[in-house]
Image (cartoon, rainbow, N blue to C red):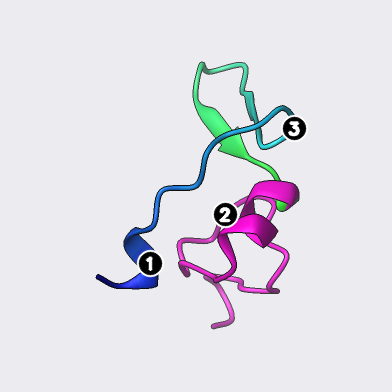
Amino acid sequence: MSFHNKKIPLEEGDYYITAEGYRCFTEQYHLKRGYCCKSGCRHCPYGFNKKTD
């Protein structure tokens, strides 16, 4: 099993609901996950930018 498939239990502060009704993961969650998915997440702590990477 790849560590990328590991389920991370959600805790308070891991996400918020956007005005459009989507779940948006916070920097806290991304750091717990431990890797960058290279999707251009709004709160990516790993410095990934779809436009430049």
Question: Which badge, 1 or 2, is on the more N-terminal residue?
Answer: 1
Task: Please report whichever mark, 3 or 2, sits nearer to the chain's N-terminal start.
Answer: 3
Question: How far is mark 1 from mark 2, CA to CA?
Answer: 16 Å
Q: CA distance from mark 3 to mark 1?
A: 21 Å
Residue 23 vertical position relative to residue 9 in the rendered view, above or below: above
- Circle 2 packing at 10 Å, graded few (<14), some (14-19), many (20+), is some
At label 1, the amino acid type is His
Based on the picture, tell me whether residue 48 belongs to the magenta stretch.
Answer: yes
Of callouts 3 and 1, the N-terminal one: 1
Q: Residue furthest left?
A: 1
* Residue at 47 percent of width and 69 percent of height: 38
- Part of the protein shown in magenta: 28-53
Residue visible at 73% across and 65% down?
45
Say what amino acid the circle numbered 3 marks: Gly
**According to the image, label 2 marks what residue?**
41
Specify the farthest residue to the bottom. 53
Image quadrant in which the N terminus is located:
bottom left
Please report the residue visible at 69 percent of the width from the left and 43 percent of the height from the top: 26
Q: Which residue is mark 1?
A: 4
Q: How far from the left and from the top, in percent, is residue 39?
A: 45, 61
Q: Residues within 10 Å of mark 1 (few under 14, many from 20)?
A: few
The circle on residue 13 is 3
The picture places residue 28, in percent across and down from the top left corner, at 74, 49
Of residues 19 and 28, the one nearer the viewer is: 28
